[in-house]
Image (cartoon, grey):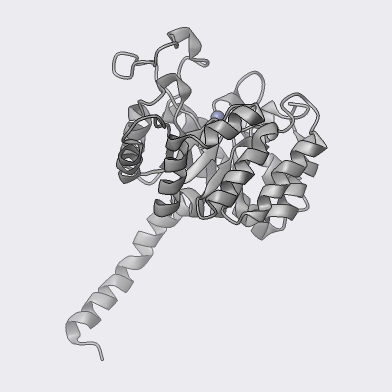
Amino acid sequence: MQNRRQLLRTSLGAALAPLASCQHSSQSSGWIDAHVHVWTPDLERYPLAEGFTRQSMQPPSFTPEQLFAHAKPQGVSRIVLIQMSYYRFDNRYMLDMMRRHPGTFSGVAIVDDKAADVEQRMLELARQGVRGFRLVPPADPVAARAWFASPGIETMYRVGAQHRLNMCLLINPEALGEAAAMCRRFPKTPVVIDHFARLGMAGAIEPAGLKALLDLAAFPEVTVKTSATYALGAKKAPYTDLLPMLRACRDAFGAKRLMWASDCPFQVEKGHNYKDSIDLVHERADFLTERERQWLLRDTAQRVFFS
Ligand SMILES: [Zn+2]
C-alpha cells in the first residue's frame, strides 16, 4: 500500500513526465552518428601534437556548430566524437565539447598505451563520459600480432572488459585475423571495427578481406561501423556499390551489431555530403526492415556508446 506521500510523489511524477520525456525524446528519438571528428583553429588553447601544423588541419576548422549544420537537418541528434590525431593524447578539446553540449556527445579517446598508468588514464577519461579508446594496429599482420601482445594493449583489453569500454579499431582487412585472436583471448572486451575494416579503400571489396570481417561475427562483443562511404569502393555517391557489403554484414552480424556513421568532416569534403551518407542506410538499403534501420541509425550506438 502506498502512503500519502508516496502517492503524491507518484502523481507529481506522472504529471511532470510528459514534459520531461518530451524534452528527452526529441534527443533520444533522433539518429546517432557513431563517428565524427571535431577540431578548432584556436591553437593557443588547444595546441597540436608534435608533427602537426595548422596546414595539417583540413578543413582548417570543424567545430560542433559546423557539424550540427550538416547533421541536424538529417535528423541526427547525438554524435560519437572520435579523438582527432592532430591532438594525439590530449583529449581536452573533445572533452570540453562533450561538457558544453550535455547529452549530445559520447567520446572515443586516445591514450598512450605505453604509459605505466594507462589503466588510471582510461578510468579518468571514462569518468568524463568516454566510452571507447581508439587503437590503430599496424597494417602488417606480423607486426600487428606483436603490437596486440604488448603489455599496454593487453591492459587496455582487460580494463575494457572490466568496465565495458570499447576497443575501437581503425584496422585494415589484413590485420583482422590478429583482431580475432584478441577476441578469443579477451572474449568479454567490447570491440568496435571502424569503417567496414576499410574494405575497398583501394577500390575493389576483396572477398578474402570481407570474409575476415564477417568471421568476427562469431564474437558476440564485436560491432561494426558501416561508415566512411566517401572513402570506400567507387567512392562516389550514392555509394550503392557498398550495399552488397552492408547486406553481408547485416546477414552475419545482424543489425543490432552495426552502426551507421559519417566520419565527418571527411564525408562533407571534396564534393561529398552528409545526406548521401545517411541515405545509403535510410533510403537505399531496401533489404533492411524498418526496425533494422533503427538499429543501424540509432539503437546499436545508443547501447554501445550512450548507455
Ligand atoms: Zn575518422
Where residue 304 sits: x, y (%)? 50, 51
Please say whether residue 216 is visible from this viewpoint: yes
Q: Residue 296 vs residue 37: left or right?
A: right
* Quadrant of the snapshot with the N terminus: bottom left
Say which quarter of the image contains residue 128. Answer: top left
Q: Residue 131 vs residue 200: left or right?
A: left
Query: Which sits in the foreground, 27 or 176?
Result: 176
The residue shown at (59%, 31%) is 144
Query: Which sits in the foreground, 225 or 76?
Result: 225
* Quadrant of the snapshot with the C terminus: bottom left
Where residue 86 sits: x, y (%)? 44, 19
Where residue 192 sits: x, y (%)? 56, 44
Task: Tell me the quadrant of ligand 1.
Answer: top right
The residue shown at (47%, 37%) is 153
The residue shown at (51%, 33%) is 135
- On screen, residue 190 above or below 6: above
- On screen, residue 26 above or below 126: below
Q: Residue 259 vs residue 151: left or right?
A: right
Where residue 203 sits: x, y (%)? 78, 26
